[in-house]
Image: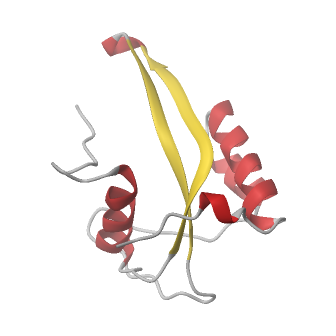
Amino acid sequence: MSLVVWKKGETGWQAIVRELKEETQIEDVELHSADFLEQFYEAHKNRIMVIPCFVLFCKPNQMVTLNHEHTDYRWCTLQEAKQLAPFANQHQLYEHVWKHYVESKPSPFTVIKQK
């Protein structure tokens, strides 16, 4: 099984924005590079995966309409999100995002201008 997120000619950030819209109907977001790479080893394929991470800010009380790929969603505290994530590097990502994007004002250098 292979997970393909990017479409031909699409950048990583364009794929994230498109997937968000397709899966939640959320369109109006402020997009940032998370300044974090998630990495892990896939033993069954003998490969190392390195994935850029992004932070998207939507409007408060944003309406969410899920597509057929999902059955539920929730907004979480940091601790709740970490309890739901099984891997240590996901916990590190969540802590990084919480520190630099929730508790602090994000750096303007991480903003990705959408065209």
Q: Is residue 32 left or right of residue 77?
A: left
What residue is drawn where x is 28% and y is 48%? 5
Q: Is residue 25 above or below residue 20?
A: below
What residue is drawn where x is 53% and y is 47%? 53
Q: Inspect this view and state whether residue 70 appears.
A: no
Residue 97 at x, y percent in the picture: 70, 54
Kindly give the residue lying farthest to the front in the view shown: 109
Residue 115 at x, y percent in the picture: 34, 73
Q: In this view, does 27 lie to the left or right of 41?
A: left
Choose between 5 and 67: the one closer to the eye. 5
Residue 80 in which image quadrant: bottom right
**Count of all numbered marks drawn on residues in the image:** 0
The N terminus is located in which quarter?
A: top left
Residue 14 in which image quadrant: bottom left
Residue 52 at x, y percent in the picture: 49, 42
Q: In this view, does 103 lie above or below 27?
A: above
Q: Inspect this view and state whether residue 43 appears.
A: yes
Choose between 94 and 110: the one closer to the eye. 110
Choose between 18 and 62: the one closer to the eye. 18
Q: Is residue 110 left or right of residue 106?
A: left
What residue is drawn where x is 64% and y is 59%? 109
Residue 98 at x, y percent in the picture: 76, 57
